[in-house]
């Protein structure tokens, strides 16, 4: 009986990676929606009699599937929705709502979307869990040399100052706890531009000391067309069936949604992004778009955030960009006659990973010429935006970097 090529590969990988102790601590940085958030309420008013006005303790507001059931979802939306102050250009929670990150640094905050153990039978709710389990099987220990860096993903980097402070301390502490070993950062989706902003603001000597490499999974470096759908019709969140219009007020009010709209750096004024009966919109028409959907706060949110990483300045850390391609990804949103903006648009597909357009996934490649630290690229045919976190090709690559080439 002959060995299959898979088992030969397995033996090779095993020899490369076995019987070794972890050298680099790993810190996981989630994407949009990938951090658990906890809320405490003491509200003067609520939208419906069935919404809780006051809670004794913090409860899990993101993500709890029960909160997204048809009746409580209006309560959820009102509690999660940020309010924008046009004078100070800052966003704040509704009066009487406190939303916080719990257990910063612990992996459980980013392993599952819904921390309720019962929901762990729903495999689609696993987030960094598969990667963490693989590392644990290779002698990594949760919260010792593998950690999580959750943040309030509703916000863009201009409002993540406390997160960046915590992250800096987490990295410095983890370095010391692990015998002065630099980190390997593993970020997903929006976690990548969030980290780029961080690298752009940290001194080179600090990065050289503390960061061994950054592994970018499905990085949305320069926006994507999909967030325009959150702004216009609303989006059904993907996880379960919710009405886009119901969740739209919350999605629109997230500064991160505005920040992740297609960047003027990669899209130009001759490319139509939104087609409607009366007019079409390109990256040059955002002001008009927000006016026409009657959400002018959105244009201010976009102006506040559009330049945060517009130049895609090289991070000056070693980067491994891993992303999928070959999947139909929203390229242009096409609204039916009379259906703008309140009905779900059709999409004219672009190449990408199902969520992020290929040009944005690849936008880091320019750094090869702009920094000394290596820039590596791994493209995975058909690796979907979320599924890439569990893709065996991703897991092998990470493992091989940590125990093979990266040593
Ligand atoms: C984990 O560490 C033990 C003890 O040093 C070693 O025998 C084992 O091979 C390691 N396992 C892996 C998968 O590296
Ligand atoms: C916005 O912030 C300013 C300055 O803190 C404050 O005076 C004003 O009342 C706020 N506006 C709203 C609508 O909350
Ligand atoms: C920062 O860390 C502190 C202490 O662990 C925690 O109380 C706080 O919620 C964290 N804030 C953010 C934004 O991560
Ligand atoms: C706009 O982008 C398209 C597609 O990338 C390109 O073909 C076209 O030449 C660009 N137009 C301008 C004016 O830069
Ligand atoms: C919008 O763009 C589509 C496709 O490019 C084009 O067929 C249509 O004429 C445009 N509509 C307007 C109002 O410009
Ligand atoms: C626009 O929004 C405001 C406030 O949300 C609302 O009062 C108004 O009726 C809306 N106008 C249209 C034309 O939808």
Image: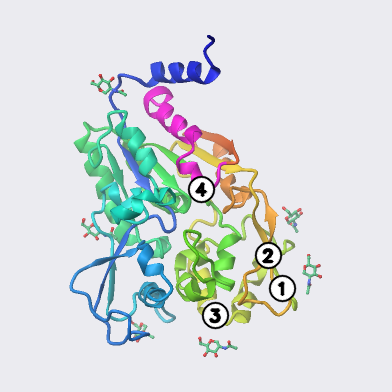
Check disc 3 and report the residue beneath it.
296
The prevailing secondary structure element of the residues shown in magenta is helix
Question: Does the stretch in magenta take in 405?
Answer: yes
Kindly tell me whether residue 347 is visible in this rendering. yes
Check disc 1 and report the residue beneath it.
336
**Lower position in the chain sequence, tag 2 or tag 3:** 3
**Lower position in the chain sequence, tag 2 or tag 1:** 1
Q: Position of residue 115 (x, y in %)?
A: 30, 55
Cα separation, mark 1 vs mark 4, equals: 31 Å
**Quadrant (top left, top right, bottom left, bottom right) of the C terminus:** top left
Cα separation, mark 4 vs mark 2, equals: 25 Å
Cα separation, mark 2 vs mark 3, equals: 24 Å
- Range of residues picked out in magenta: 383-407
**Residue drawn at 39 percent across, 48 percent down:** 126
Q: Position of residue 358 (x, y in %)?
A: 62, 48
Kindly tell me whether residue 372 is visible in this rendering. no
Q: Position of residue 76 (x, y in %)?
A: 37, 73
Describe the element under mark 1 as helix, strand or loop.
loop
Left or right, 335 with respect to 137, comes to right
* The disc label shown at residue 349, or none: none
Check disc 2 and report the residue beneath it.
346
Cα separation, mark 2 vs mark 1, equals: 8 Å
């Amino acid at each position: 009986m002959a060995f299959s090529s898979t088992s030969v590969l397995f033996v090779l990988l095993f020899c490369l990676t076995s019987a070794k102790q972890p050298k680099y601590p790993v810190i996981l940085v989630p994407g949009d929606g990938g951090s658990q958030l906890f809320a405490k309420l003491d509200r003067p008013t609520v939208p419906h009699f069935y919404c809780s006005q006051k809670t004794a303790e913090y409860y899990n507001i993101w993500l709890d599937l029960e909160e997204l059931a048809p009746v409580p979802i209006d309560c959820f939306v009102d509690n999660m929705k940020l309010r924008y102050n046009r004078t100070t250009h800052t966003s704040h929670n509704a009066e009487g709502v406190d939303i916080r990150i719990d257990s910063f640094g612990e992996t459980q905050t980013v392993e599952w979307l819904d921390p309720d153990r019962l929901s762990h039978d729903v495999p689609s709710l696993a987030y960094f869990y598969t990667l963490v389990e693989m590392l644990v099987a290779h002698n990594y220990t949760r919260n010792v040399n593998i950690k999580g860096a959750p943040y309030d993903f509703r916000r863009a980097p201009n409002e993540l100052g406390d997160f960046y402070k915590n992250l800096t301390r987490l990295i410095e502490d983890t370095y010391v706890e692990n015998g002065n070993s630099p980190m390997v950062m593993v970020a997903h989706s929006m976690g990548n531009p969030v980290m780029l902003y961080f690298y752009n603001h940290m001194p080179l000597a600090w990065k050289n000391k503390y960061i061994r490499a950054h592994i970018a999974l499905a990085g949305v470096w320069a926006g994507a067309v999909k967030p325009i759908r959150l702004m216009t019709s609303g989006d059904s969140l993907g996880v379960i069936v919710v009405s886009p219009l119901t969740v739209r007020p919350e999605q629109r009010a997230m500064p991160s949604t505005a920040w992740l709209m297609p960047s003027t750096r990669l899209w130009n004024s001759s490319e139509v992004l939104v087609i409607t009966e009366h007019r079409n919109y390109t990256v040059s028409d955002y002001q008009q778009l927000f006016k026409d959907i009657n959400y002018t706060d959105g244009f201010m949110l976009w102006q506040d955030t559009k330049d945060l990483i517009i130049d895609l300045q090289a991070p000056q850390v070693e980067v491994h960009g891993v992303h999928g391609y070959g999947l139909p990804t929203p390229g242009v949103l096409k609204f039916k006659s009379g259906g703008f903006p309140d009905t779900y648009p059709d999409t004219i597909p672009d190449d990408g990973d199902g969520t992020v357009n290929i040009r944005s996934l690849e936008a880091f490649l320019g750094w090869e010429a702009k920094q000394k630290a290596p820039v590596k690229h791994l493209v995975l045919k058909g690796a979907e935006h979320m599924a890439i976190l569990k893709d065996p090709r991703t897991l092998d690559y990470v493992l091989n970097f940590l125990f093979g080439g990266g040593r």
